Amino acid sequence: MARPRHRGSPRPYRRSPLPPAPPQGAPGPRLPRALMSVTAGPGPADKGQGRRGRGGEGPAPGPAPPPARPRPASCAAPPRPLRKGRRSHPCPESAAGRAQVGRGAGGARPRPGGGRCAVPRSLAQTLLVSRNRRCPGVPGAAAVGAMTTICDLPEDVLVELLSLLPARDLLRTCRLVCAQWRAVVDLTTLWKRKCQREGFYLQNLDRSISDWKIFYILCSLKRNLIKNPCAEENFQHWKLDKNEGDKWKIEHLPGPHGKEMPGSKVHKYFVTSYGPCFKSQLITLQKEGYWNQLMDEKRPEIVVKDWYAARFDCGCRYELTVRLLSEDYIVLEEFRPEPVVIEQWNDAAWREISHTFQNYPAGVRYIWFQHGGQDTQFWAGWYGIRVTNSSITIGPLTLL
């Protein structure tokens, strides 16, 4: 179907909102009063022609629209309220805050840390914020000569403040702030002060300790690395390598035909049977807080202790093996004394065996501890060796 055409015009219909051009000499279409001033006059491209004409003149210009009346004061918009939680005074870190503070008594002094400044969550963060933030001025502060940053404190005061922080925050946060704090954290005075606070300092150690920082770290990490050494948690944390005869058992001190441990708070012990009974633990040093560089460069002393006893009416056999292992579980050093054989009708006293690893090869990552034994009479029941209160500690020998 052909598209419609305009009467008397050979041109096809265009999709345009504009009406067709009027004949020559006819008046143009009547426009609203607001548009008369806009459409009057020739366009930039058609000189002497109206906007809608093709040779004739455009419509006559109409009167200009009346000016807008001023808005009455009663209709003025109310002041915009502050958002919930936002303070009316500026942050002292901003330019407006510094200008307001500089007015002295004429302007209200803002509270330090106002605005959007974050609140520190620890003492280390407080010191860092104090270092990076200028103290807000107060009237007369310049005359008194008030300090502006924490870095202006005397060195002994800064040492006293930093000595209150944990060693982890000092080494991982404060030491990375600036060169001044790095030098203060590395001072011997700071770590000696921390040793005094926590009871690690002894007067006769001043000349024997070369690195007080490492000494403090080893003292703070020092503890028994053997878990459940006194059978208080049954056999938890222990691996039963051999469990023959009537198997392992837990008894209370002193036990049948036994004795109490001298000056000890131990209440239970492990006892073996007539078959071989051995149990062990594998200690991962990095999980216990001893990183690889510390073990390779400083090589602190590793002290192993164990307690054993026998029944009065039965003989038994006791064995102990401790190995220092590498990352690939290669044996770097081993302590394995001769088996201890206790005869029948003995004194049933508790005995301690100990060994200290010193100057061992670098690369120690694990410690493997195993002990056990059996009775020598092959009696049914639990007449074998008794063990308890095992321990492995890493640290200075002066605190043993």
Image (cartoon, helix red, strand yellow):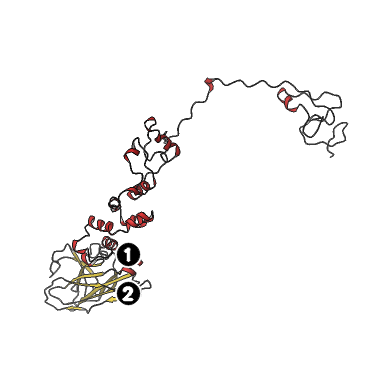
Q: Which residue is farthest front?
A: 143
Quadrant in which the C terminus appears: bottom left
* Left or right for 61, reference 106: right
Q: Examine the rendering and report whether any part of residue 92 can be seen.
A: yes
Kind of residue at badge 2: Pro
* Left or right for 270, reference 32: left
Q: Nearer the viewer, residue 239 or 100?
A: 100
Vertical comparison of 121 with 337: above or below: above
Q: Quadrant of residue 117?
A: top left
Q: Are marks 1 and 2 in contact (CB under 8 Å)?
A: no
Q: Nearer the viewer, residue 331 or 247?
A: 331
Position in image of residue 119 (x %, y %): 37, 44
Residue in the picture at 40% in, 33% down: 103
Vertical comparison of 85 with 308: above or below: above
Q: Examine the rendering and report whether any part of residue 400 can be seen.
A: no
**Residue 290, label in figure:** 1
Residue in the picture at 38% in, 54% down: 178
Q: Nearer the viewer, residue 238 or 249?
A: 238
Q: Secondary structure at mark 2?
A: loop
Residue in the picture at 31% in, 57% down: 167
Kind of residue at badge 1: Tyr
Count of marks, rendered view:
2
Position in image of residue 224 (x %, y %): 25, 64
Q: Quadrant of residue 307?
A: bottom left
Mark earlier in primary sequence (1, 2): 1
Quadrant in which the N terminus appears: top right
Position in image of residue 276 (x %, y %): 25, 76
Q: Quadrant of residue 328?
A: bottom left
Mark 1 crowd level (few <14, some 14–19, many ≥20, 10 Å Cα): some
Q: Residue beneath label 2, please?
A: 361
Mark 2 crowd level (few <14, some 14–19, many ≥20, 10 Å Cα): few
Q: Marks 1 and 2, how far apart in space?
A: 16 Å
